[in-house]
Image (cartoon, rainbow, N blue to C red):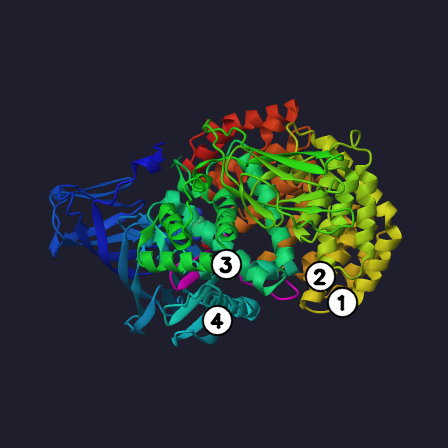
Amino acid sequence: TPVIRLADYAPPPWRVTHVDLVFDLDAEATQVEATLALQPDPARPAAPLRLDGEDLELLDIALDGQPLPPARYRVDATGLTVLGVDAPCLLRTRVRIRPQTNTRLEGLYVSGASLMTQCEAEGFRRITWFVDRPDVSAVYTVTLRADRTKYPVLLSNGNPAGAGDLDDGHHWARFVDPHPKPCYLFALVAGTLGHLSAPFRTMDGRDVTVRVWAEPADVPRCRHALESTLRAMRWDEKRFGRAYDLDVFDIVAAQDFTMGAMENKGLNIFNARFILADIDTATDADFEAIESVIGHEYFHNWSGNRVTLRDWFQLSLKEGLTVFRDQEFTADLHSRAMKRIDDVRLLKSRQFAEDAGPLAHPVRPASYSEINNFYTATVYEKGAEIIRMLHTLLGELTFRRALDLYFARHDGGAATVEDLLDAMREASGRDLAQFARWYDQAGTPQIAVTEAFDPATGDYTLHLAQHTPATPDGSEKQPLHLPFAFALYDADDRRIATPPDTDAAQRPGLVELTAAEHTLRWRGLAQRPLPAFLQGLSAPARLRYDYAASDLGRLLRIESDALVRWECAQQLVADAVLRGEARPDARPALIAALGALLADTTLDPAFVAECVSVADVWSLADRCDRIDLDLLWREREALLDDIAAAHADLLAARYDALSPAALGGLAPACIAARQLRNVALSLLTRRDPSARRAEAQFAQANTLTDRLAALAALLRVDAPGAAAALAAFRTRHADDPLTTDKWLTLVVTRPQPDAVDAVRDILAGPLWQPRNPNRVRTVLGHFARNNPVAFHRRDGAGYALLFDWLPELDRINPQVAARQLTALEPWRRLDADRAARIEAHLRAFAALPLSRDSADVAGRLLG
Ligand code: B3K
Ligand code: ZN
């Protein structure tokens, strides 16, 4: 397959400036008439006119109003070439496309009774011939025509510009989008949909109608999404000075959607799971995720749409920046400390692992064969960390000025990472040349800290050495420019304010590392201080510093930064599980620290819950060169048993005391209470084979959060009431696909080897819907990622289930299939037996005729 390289970028030889689209919509066969105003690049007048197009059936074609004879054009599998044109012209094509058979869910497809589109990254070429690249922006006029009964609601980007009836039961609606946009932001929706709406007046006085659309039965569950949208619109005005720019803003829920959501201009289309919520069908985490994804897609209106990308290599320019913006949105509205812990957990469990494995790539990759495989934790989450470091280096005010400059300068244009860094440099006067390496160098830097203390002189030195391990691209690693936050505590737990002597640039509590090594030196300290590093995770780096267990316990008590406190708990857990013999004091220190946290009712229960939740096996495995899965699982289970035993009374007391709040509604205090109470329940149930508490909670639960937590606890210990509870849950929610996915998740992640049989039964039954991405992610994705005991069963029965389905899934939806493969990322570090089984499957799979998506991932996994 051809490899596309960043170094080969060239501007488009032809541009489209205006687009007029007329759709005759029908699930079976839709006709698309496209009139494109085309302009050659004056610098390259002789370049052939080549348009991208896939799976299009040509009906007719005309140039400047004249039918084009066959000798003047050529159609092949990837596009259309028009011969003999070298001046601005109008090209009109009419094609037939088939939404019903479009199982890839790229381009125009059917979900339920609706028609809808997904064009990013390269789906528009499955709708009509076009210059399908992000640096070609055009103004669109779109006319939709469809059967009025089947498709009463018609939506597209921009402002409504007329609607009416046609003969024979059809109707039409027209939309004009005044903002030039690349075709990946095109969208249309046609269906029988209901909506909730609210008015919004922007800070510059524009009246906007905001609407959230869903299938009629689901409309009551759109309230939270609508309110989240209004919050996001207001917040972006306040925090970033960004206002909305159309008269309508529509968001549509789709049950069949390959990703989470899509920021199409003025018409966001969402996976229904990031829209639909009520207290009975969505968990507390779902509510928060919905608000965050709504924010994310809305924030793209500036970071992505008004300023878009020059090419797909710049993907993180919109994604990293927009993730940073959505993280700040949640942090400003809720608990900043808890949000950071959540984000760092995701970064470390997904992105650090990706950066350390066969799929590692720079935030801005140098090449790709399938761009859809680069919507990764690295591009998104590490990309957001890069923006966060810029925010740290520049400070809020300068950072905001830099972003204002970036938006003003590139509004309506297609930008690069350099453009963003230039704005940051100009607004701050800082040299960011070395900082730019973050975009092009793969791998997570490690910062090894060693210390020396001389009691005679009170001299204390910290030696900081950064090193980025090798990645599959074999590139040589350079030192990175990174903000390194730190604190020293004296014997009375007070922070030492004296700045160190160092050659590194510094400000209070932070040094900027630029060289491979730096030394920080203090003089005349009374005792060896206790250091804390990387507060708030000031850089996406791994810290190597050999803390004594007692110091971790102390830091967990005294440190002001919640993230570092949480990291101390994580380190104690890792030491107890992975280095139990070398570190016999880690376990008692952890248990004591957790006891102190559980006993302290002045702390945010959500924070205590985060500290008491023991990291999953993959997060622990991330710290190991070789992964002994069986040992990891056993040791982790033993630790959980020890914690449960040591704190049985405390956990029960907290459980009971938190119950009134936990049974309240959706207020933050109630959510936090449920979080800690459910961690307590899970531990308490380990010691109570009859699982009475879990059964009672299941029966009394008035939230999905509590019902699911109780059910999970019952299943984990195979409690006598587990089967009945599982059946009751199923009956209660049988009609709703999203809640059915929750139920299936519990079934496929039940940590018992015979969960394989349950997965096999599901795959043979009516709940298995391989064309629905959510269902595939639920059944195979959760099984492969979150059930190490069953999926990685020694006899290979788990792997066989995945690979039985992958070839078919790849024919249905390549993006979804390729994504499932990434669950095998750590395979080479597993024991020889497991690795050999997986390798055999991977090789057999890679030998099949595959999509570009799956061939690419399988190839890179095999290295
Ligand atoms: N930009 C979309 C993702 C599109 C994925 C294409 N395979 C959602 C987002 O990040 O906002
Ligand atoms: Zn995004």
Q: Position of residue 772 (x, y in %)?
A: 51, 50
Q: Distance of mark 4 from mark 3, alpha carbons?
A: 38 Å
Query: Which amino acid is tagged 1?
Result: Ala
User: Circle 4 is placed at which residue position?
Assistant: 195
The quarter of the picture where the N terminus appears is top left
CA gap between label 4 and label 1 equals: 33 Å
The answer to whether 326 appears left or right of 755 in the picture is left
Q: Nearer the viewer, mark 3 or mark 1?
A: 3
Q: In the figure, residue 659 lies in which quadrant?
A: bottom right
The residues bearing labels 3 and 2 have C-alpha atoms spaced at a distance of 29 Å
Q: Position of residue 47 (x, y in %)?
A: 16, 41
Residue at image position (42%, 52%) is: 318
Tell me if mark 2 has few (under 14), some (14-19) or many (20+) residues whose alpha carbon lies within 10 angstroms of its own.
many
Q: Which residue is mark 1?
A: 661
Is any atom of residue 707 visible in this view? no
Please name which of the two marks, 4 or 1, marks the residue nearer to the observer.
Answer: 1
Q: Which residue bears the numbered disc 2?
A: 672
Q: Secondary structure at mark 2?
A: helix
The residue closer to the viewer here, 575 or 159, is 575
